[in-house]
Image: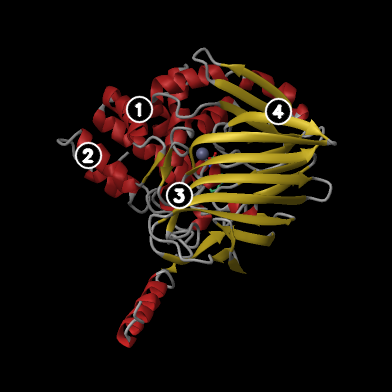
Amino acid sequence: MPRPAPLTALALLLAGTLVACDGGVHGTPGAPGLRDPYFPKAGNGGYDVTHYDLDLAYDPDGDRLSGTATLTARAGQDLSAFHLDLDGLDVEKVTVDGDTARWNRTGQELTVRPHDDLDEGRVFRVTVRYSGTPRTITDPDGSEEGWLPTEDGAVALGEPTGSMAWFPGSHHPSDKASYDLTITVPEGLRAVSNGELTQSRTSGGRTTTTWHTAEPMASYLATLAIGDYDIHTSTLADGLPVYTAVDPEEADASRKVLAQIPAVLKWAQDTFGPYPFSSTGAIVDRQGDAGYALETQNRPYFPGAPDTGTLVHELAHQWYGDSVTPRTWRDMWLNEGFATYAEWLWAEDHGGDSAQETFDALYDHGEDDHEDLWDFPPGKPSGAAHLSDSPVYQRGAMVLHKIRQRLGDTAFRALLRDWATTHRHGNADTEDFTSYVEDLAPDEDFGPVWEEWLYGDGKPTEP
Ligand code: TRP
Ligand code: ZN
């Protein structure tokens, strides 16, 4: 064998170097946020989460949560590093595809630097081991979310950014994923989450329960309620499983309203189309545990026994909000306008005021009940502190009523169903909606509805 000529050896060396370079630093860091108009740092750029596997343990005595979050994600670019959103808690270890990764934290951003770059299109798994006392986050509007300790346990509520208080992720409504959640609590307590309960086991004084959410879920809709609950399971006529968890103190007050779940869902399916998820139910906590209800996926959360209107509202969100999810927080009226309009329609269909009467009353003297009704247009909330104000809810519903007036009842009812079907399990924004409506009735002029009702400042001059 002749020795390789010096030139060949050099070529081999160079080639080797080039190959090493190619496998090395060619990725760039993913963006720390998705530039939401109201919460710019929420979510993360450069990848998409497809699945969350959360394995958690909670001890209410010490208010201590510990766990491992395993996210399956797909790189949307060549990544040298990427961010996760996590507010509070102590991170103990991070791995990417089994290899220990470097990480650091600033504010709500957990930056992960994998050992090797991740090529665009690569499906990878990141695990984060963490523990600590989770934070209660005060929203820009003053309400509390994130992790809320209660008399008998805790509840996790995530709208708009609270879920980063209890698990790391891409916490923006545009990045939906399926979930598996395993939660271990002291024996005697219940732990209720989204989706379906697939397993529950007690040993050594601790109960471990597993919940599976197959349909895509935005992280703000993820919940975990731990405490003393009366559990009731049943199935609807069409086979849909119903799981309700009610704080014993609210049992009497809840019985009648929760008995309406089958009737509300039947009406909602007639009105909005097929129910989008594989189970339903409700979580009713004690008064004062949280100041508001939330449309947590599959089973909404209520702070005390709800009235029928609130039950209708939160169940309607399963179509509008949970299945068809806003692309950014600016599109919030697509959630709240629809859920509010669902209350109006329920009343109209059950011997109460017609939606026209509700609309007229709001137009004529809505400021009596909602001082801020005309403060800003539903399509452009005046700030993060105002996402849950009346212009988003009541005036958002008024936009839908203006569309109904132009389309007529039959076409409007078809719109409610078809909008939910078209974007089922996806995301949509306000422009998707306006162009969708215009395509339905090309001869109709919706310009004034958008200009005055959806985007216009102040009270529209014509009701
Ligand atoms: N989406 C809830 C509902 O209407 C209300 C709500 C709770 C909310 N937290 C929020 C709205 C934060 C906006 C922002 O049932
Ligand atoms: Zn709502």
- Residue sitting at x 42%, y 52%: 328
Residue 175 — which label?
A: 3
**Quadrant in the rendering for residue 453:** top left
Q: CA distance from mark 4 to mark 1?
A: 31 Å
Q: Amino acid at mark 2?
A: Glu
Residue closest to the far left:
443
Closer mark to the observer between disc 1 and disc 3: 3
Q: Which residue is mark 1?
A: 417
**Quadrant in the rendering for residue 201:** top right
Q: CA distance from mark 2 to mark 1?
A: 16 Å
Q: CA distance from mark 1 to mark 3?
A: 24 Å
Q: Amino acid at mark 4?
A: Val
Q: Which residue is mark 4?
A: 246
**Quadrant in the rendering for residue 77:** bottom left
- The residue closer to the viewer here, 220 or 64, is 64
Dot 1: within a 10 Å radius of its alpha carbon, few (fewer than 14), some, or many (20 or more) residues?
some
Element carrying mark 4: strand
Choose the circle earlier in sequence order: 2 or 1: 1
Q: Is residue 198 left or right of residue 381?
A: right
Q: CA distance from mark 4 to mark 3?
A: 31 Å
In the rendered image, is residue 187 in sight?
Answer: yes
Q: Which residue is mark 2?
A: 438
Q: Amino acid at mark 3?
A: Asp
